[in-house]
Image: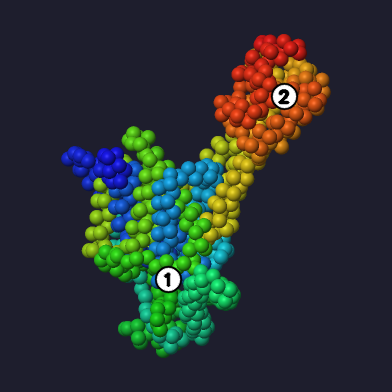
């Protein structure tokens, strides 16, 4: 009964708590919170969400995961990898930052949570073994590059085009380098240098938090953000007006198409579920209309991406009016001689309702809603569930792999036992519960968990304390974050993910498994080429890994044996050995006898017979045969009968119990004769040498 209660409420293992333990958790919780707050905001932007959703994801999910997880030092919350994967999965269906995009991000979190919970309840964590080490490294390296370089536009202060090709988008960012915003670059470089210096010289200080506070203060004092909300009539440049009007109209059409596609998908799904012939025909018509809209949406997004880049390249200057309503904006250099300029260079920033937003400064976080997230049941778009399922499954596995690897790494120093199934359940519950409070997908964080372990965290109480700190920020301090430069958040992301890039493990693995490393390299380039749909990259790696495994299973190691100089047995071809005898042939077969490789087993036996035409017996050294199925048993019987017709006996030695039992229960032992089976290979070789002659002596 006690065991059942502890399994149901894993956090009971924290008790009884000592005063020293509570003090250690308090210190660790506060320390982690200093990293969590700026990180969560940065990762939310990476996920295409307003920064406040990063704080929402650092509240309820953190508490639930700490209570029902397996590791006492694992910290759950927003992480870079899943933030990018969430954005990549949803961008084809909604515009980042829009209400519909936020709704889908929350739904995706619930899907990931349900998948992890099911994997944990059915103890299917072993499915992560499909992700080989080279594939994981290849994917992680590619994802780290994608995540890091996706922040380059924020560091340069230029727009980041979003199309179906990440590499093409990145190239467009590089083409905009001549239009970079120098104050933005200075904020980014300054934050990078400050965090790096503090990590090396004073690692005990929260470098990220110091950079955030300092940059926010400087941004507020210097007026780094300088925006103006104006009417289109105030812009005195026909080219800019035309581009802005087309951009705004296209954005409105994109929003309308996105809603229309979702509505058509829902209606089609309902009709398909009805099952009648008439409803299926109507659903097919709706699907066709949906495809037309999707094509139009794709074209419009591409065109508006080009317009956005072109608008950013247009520089304007304004007259020196005292308020936004009186300002007139002209193309740079075209200010009338009768008007005095304000000395600032203005660029298009966006459209808000009927007004145009122009900026002469850099981008800041802006308004963050105060207060805690309210309880809301996630809206499920059933028409998109199947479309998002592959990405959700990959995110569930990647997040689980991250969480368990972090937990096990910490457990080596703490001695705590990590139960992967319980960890899956805890992570699943965290995502499900979080989706009811505005959270997007979360997982275990390596950086924050390492900080917790280093700070001396004893129990999951430290994570709850860090969540309480986030609550305080949401209630009282969001207004102070308004002037935080987005470039600083971008630097936080870049520094976190670039540290994940590893090359040496692939170099070491090359010496052992060149095919596996090749698959890892293919995964790396596939992930880059398929971005932003990076889940497809790792799925390709999994498919290639499984195919490689199947091919290996179809052709296991098999060789004709002879005696080496040291007295052990080795392959004739591999070691250049002389045969023991022309009258009997020992063959090693290191693979299960199943439907997938019985044809290869037959080829090996017949090849041995062909090479030794005088042979009277072929001995299969079966210590490497772990399993046999009905196809294998049938093939052994068939080969034994065929060899017997030619006066050759098929024999076995060193069979494992389960294989011997299969032979015996099928009647094969009786048919072949018990003298065809030997308990070990040396006894078999001695018997065959006495019967047929040959040199089997040890050196």
Q: Residue at x 31, y 52 (%)?
A: 64
- Mark 2, other Cα within 10 Å: few <14 / some 14–19 / many ≥20: many
Image x and y of residue 29, in percent? 26, 48
Image x and y of residue 207, in percent? 32, 51
Image x and y of residue 300, in percent? 55, 76
Decide: is 38 above or below 128. Answer: below
Q: Nearer the viewer, mark 2 or mark 1?
A: 2
Q: Dividing the picture into quarters, in which one does residue 609 lie?
A: top right
How many marks overall?
A: 2
Q: Secondary structure at mark 1?
A: helix
Decide: is 48 above or below 353. Answer: above
Q: Residue at x 68, y 21 (%)?
A: 673
Decide: is 258 above or below 39. Answer: below
Q: Residue at x 45, y 44 (%)?
A: 125
- Mark 1, other Cα within 10 Å: few <14 / some 14–19 / many ≥20: some
Tell which of 539 and 147 is nearer to you. 539
Tell which of 511 and 269 is nearer to you. 269
Image x and y of residue 531, in percent? 54, 59
Quadrant in the picture for the N terminus: top left
Q: Mark 1 = which residue?
A: 100
Q: Mark 2 = which residue?
A: 650
């Amino acid at each position: 009964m006690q065991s059942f209660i502890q399994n149901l409420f894993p956090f009971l293992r924290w008790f009884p708590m000592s005063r020293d333990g509570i003090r250690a958790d308090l210190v660790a919780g506060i320390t982690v919170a200093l990293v969590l707050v700026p990180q969560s905001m940065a990762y939310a932007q990476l996920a295409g969400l307003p920064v406040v959703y990063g704080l929402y994801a650092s509240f309820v999910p953190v508490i639930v995961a700490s209570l029902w997880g397996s590791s006492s030092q694992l910290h759950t919350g927003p992480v870079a990898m899943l933030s990018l994967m969430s954005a990549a999965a949803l961008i084809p269906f909604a515009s980042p930052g829009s209400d519909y995009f936020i709704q889908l991000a929350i739904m995706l979190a619930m899907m990931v949570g349900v998948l992890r919970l099911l994997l944990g309840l059915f103890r299917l964590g072993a499915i992560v073994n499909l992700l080989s080490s080279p594939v994981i490294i290849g994917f992680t390296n590619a994802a780290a590059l994608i995540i890091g370089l996706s922040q380059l536009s924020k560091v340069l202060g230029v727009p980041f085009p979003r199309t179906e090709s990440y590499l093409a988008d990145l190239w467009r960012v590089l083409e905009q380098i001549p239009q970079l915003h120098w104050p933005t670059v200075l904020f980014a470089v300054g934050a990078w240098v400050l965090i790096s210096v503090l990590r090396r010289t004073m690692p005990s200080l929260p470098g990220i938090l110091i950079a955030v506070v300092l940059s926010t203060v400087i941004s507020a004092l210097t007026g780094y953000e300088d925006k103006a909300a104006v009417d289109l009539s105030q812009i005195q440049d026909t080219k800019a007006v035309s581009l802005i009007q087309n951009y705004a109209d296209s954005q409105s059409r994109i929003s309308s198409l996105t809603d229309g596609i979702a509505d058509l998908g829902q209606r089609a799904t309902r009709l398909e579920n009805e099952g009648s012939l008439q409803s299926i025909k109507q659903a097919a018509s709706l699907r066709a209309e949906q495809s037309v809209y999707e094509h139009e949406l794709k074209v419009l997004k591409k065109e508006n991406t080009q317009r956005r880049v072109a608008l950013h390249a247009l520089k304007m200057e304004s007259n020196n009016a005292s308020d936004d309503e009186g300002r007139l904006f002209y193309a740079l250099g075209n200010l009338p001689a009768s008007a005095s300029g304000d000395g600032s260079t203005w660029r298009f920033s966006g459209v808000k309702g009927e007004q145009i937003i122009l900026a002469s400064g850099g981008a800041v976080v802006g308004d963050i809603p105060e207060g805690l997230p309210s309880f809301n049941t996630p809206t499920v778009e059933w028409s998109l569930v199947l479309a998002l399922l592959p990405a959700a499954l990959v995110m569930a596995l990647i997040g689980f792999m991250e969480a368990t690897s972090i937990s096990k790494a910490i457990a080596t120093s703490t001695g705590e036992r990590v139960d992967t199934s319980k960890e899956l359940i805890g992570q699943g519950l965290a995502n499900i519960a979080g989706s009811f409070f505005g959270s997007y997908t979360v997982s275990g964080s390596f950086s924050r968990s390492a900080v917790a372990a280093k700070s001396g965290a004893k129990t999951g109480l430290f994570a709850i304390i860090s969540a309480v700190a986030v609550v305080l920020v949401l209630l009282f301090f969001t207004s102070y974050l308004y002037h935080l430069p987005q470039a600083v958040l971008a630097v936080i992301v870049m520094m976190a993910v670039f540290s994940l890039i590893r090359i040496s493990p692939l170099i070491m693995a090359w010496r052992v498994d060149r095919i596996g490393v090749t698959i890892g390299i293919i995964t790396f380039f596939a992930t880059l080429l398929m971005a932003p749909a990076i889940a497809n990259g790792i799925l390709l790696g999994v498919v290639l890994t499984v195919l490689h495994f199947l091919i290996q299973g179809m052709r296991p190691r098999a060789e004709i044996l002879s005696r080496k100089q040291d007295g052990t047995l080795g392959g004739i071809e591999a070691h250049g050995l002389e045969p023991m005898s022309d009258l009997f042939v020992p063959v090693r077969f290191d693979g299960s006898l199943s439907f997938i490789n019985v044809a290869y087993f037959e080829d090996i036996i017949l090849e041995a017979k062909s090479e030794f035409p005088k042979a009277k017996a072929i001995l299969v050294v079966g210590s490497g045969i772990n399993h046999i199925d009905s196809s294998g048993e049938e093939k052994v019987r068939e080969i034994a009968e065929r060899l017997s017709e030619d006066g050759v006996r098929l024999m076995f030695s060193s069979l494992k119990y389960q294989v011997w039992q299969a032979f015996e229960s099928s009647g094969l032992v009786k048919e072949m004769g018990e003298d065809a089976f030997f308990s070990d290979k040396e006894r078999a070789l001695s018997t065959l040498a006495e019967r047929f002659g040959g040199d089997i002596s040890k050196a």
